[in-house]
Image: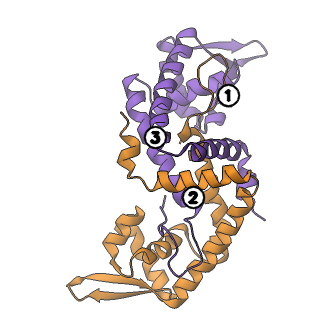
Chain colours: A orange, B purple
Amino acid sequence: MAEHGRATECGGQSARKDLAAMMVPLGRALMAAELPVLEAHGLAMWAYSVLLHLEDEPVRTQSALAQAIGADKTRIIGVLDDLERRGLILRRPDPADRRARLLSLTPEGRHLRDTVQSAIQHRENQLLARLPAADRRGFLNALRALSALPPEEITGGD
Amino acid sequence: MAEHGRATECGGQSARKDLAAMMVPLGRALMAAELPVLEAHGLAMWAYSVLLHLEDEPVRTQSALAQAIGADKTRIIGVLDDLERRGLILRRPDPADRRARLLSLTPEGRHLRDTVQSAIQHRENQLLARLPAADRRGFLNALRALSALPPEEITGGD
């Protein structure tokens, strides 16, 4: 939602903008930067998200996947149907629970995911190349560390 | 929207997550971390955004403000009414255009903004304190530089 202003000091005490005020619009722009790459490969953002998450574990149920990517189950079904039709994922019944379905990437799905991610990160690296090397390294280290924290540790505060 | 997985390498070529996949959820958590501070001072996120943006320039019209914070004009009117009622902002007719209204912070508005921002950044600094100094410095430098770019330069790509 809102972007917050105030680049620097002006009588007040703050020498920097709030972190969310910098990160939220930047994250949004980075997501927008992915769209042309995704479109070129016929992938919606949710479909890309599915392909990325299926790599974390070889198989998982549809509901576990929906939860992991923050999608509601209804929305994800159509995305999975399409990916399966295109031979990018496999769905098969869970031997342990016949009502559940296990998901996995096909070699084609893995290949497409790698191609798309590589193109996305190529663009990102061009952007990162504008930064001095030390800042780039610090940025990526910090981003990796902070984004690995459970959200409660960020929202928790004092 | 979607968060993307794949922490590290696993046969594919990527040694890191996509930037948006790290930044979007982190930005969302940082925004959530602001909420208790804002609530404690009776401010909605949009109201805080208004207070921050009015500092950028001493006065501006309601439509310019709405555009700057990415709000629609309808939504912003009620927020401004409330801030004015509480003596935090002033609205007066623009001498150059009597249909337009110029906005400014009152001393009370400036004080509240500084108090709230200081509390928000205090919490953020506790989070940043977990990082090694070099990463913290690089992170803030990079964030400042990247968030100052016009969004087109991020979405533009090659």
The residue where tag 3 is placed is B127
Q: Chain of mark 2?
A: B
Local crowd size for mark 3, using a 10 Å CA cut-off: few (<14), some (14–19), many (≥20): some
Give the camera-side residue of B54 and A27: A27
Q: Is residue A2 visible?
A: no
Q: Which residue type carries mark 2?
A: Ala
The residue where tag 1 is placed is A8
The residue where tag 2 is placed is B20
Q: Is residue B155 visible?
A: yes
Counting from the top left corner in percent of width and height, residue A152 is at 35, 47
How many labels were placed on the picture? Answer: 3
Look at the picture and state if A134 lies above or below B14: above
Discs 1, 3: same chain: no
Local crowd size for mark 1, using a 10 Å CA cut-off: few (<14), some (14–19), many (≥20): few
State which quadrant residue B43 falls in.
top left
Cα separation between marks 3 and 2: 20 Å
Q: Is residue A119 left or right of residue B121?
A: right
Instruction: Check disc 3 and report its element: helix, strand or loop.
Output: helix
